[in-house]
Image (cartoon, grey):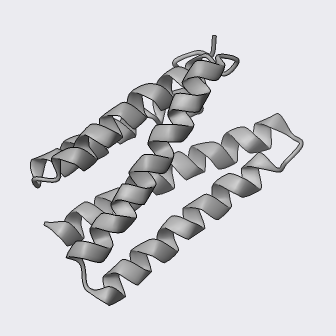
Amino acid sequence: MVSWKNPLVYTNFLFFINAVCYGAIGFKILGILFFLTAICSLQYHRFPQNIYWRRLDMFFASSSLMFVLGTIYMHLSLFNAVVMTLLALLTLIIKRYGDIQNDPSYYKRCHTVWHLCVFYTNILVVQLLF
């Protein structure tokens, strides 16, 4: 079990903020998806050997990403949708870069930065949707 003090664990609470923000502006499905992502990601990072939480984390994180991308293309200008898509791709590159490193501490740093980037990118999306 990983400590609550680990940044990989406590940065997952940011996704609850994303969930509340999406719900508050009327995007209830995104709110629910981010709430489920936050729970599953938090549990996975607390118990990284548990394949159940890993699969749920991957499922809900991927679902949230796909739903956000679909939402921005339906509700934002083409320019803003492209910018948000590029930011999403940048966050995935950061995550992937950390995934391929052999040093666990480097993975931890990159994955934590990824959590922060996902949070801030979604706050920007909320601002654009509002």
Residue at the spot 22% in from the left edge and 46% down from the top edge:
29
| Residue found farthest to the right | 102
The one of 87 and 81 positioned closer to us in this rendering: 81
Residue 94 in percent (x, y) is at 65, 59
Is residue 89 in view?
yes
Is residue 21 in view?
no
Residue 13 in percent (x, y) is at 38, 33
Q: Quadrant of residue 123?
A: bottom left
The N terminus appears in which quarter of the rendering?
Answer: top right
Residue at the spot 60% in from the left edge and 60% down from the top edge:
92
Looking at the image, residue 101 sits to the left or right of residue 57; the answer is: right
Residue at the spot 75% in from the left edge and 47% down from the top edge:
99
Residue at the spot 60% in from the left edge and 28% down from the top edge:
54
- Seen in the picture, residue 24 relative to 55 is either above or below; the reply is below
- Seen in the picture, residue 38 relative to 79 is either above or below; the reply is above
The C terminus appears in which quarter of the rendering?
Answer: bottom left
| Residue found farthest to the top | 1
Residue 126 in percent (x, y) is at 23, 61
The mark tally for this picture is 0
- Seen in the picture, residue 28 relative to 129 is either above or below; the reply is above
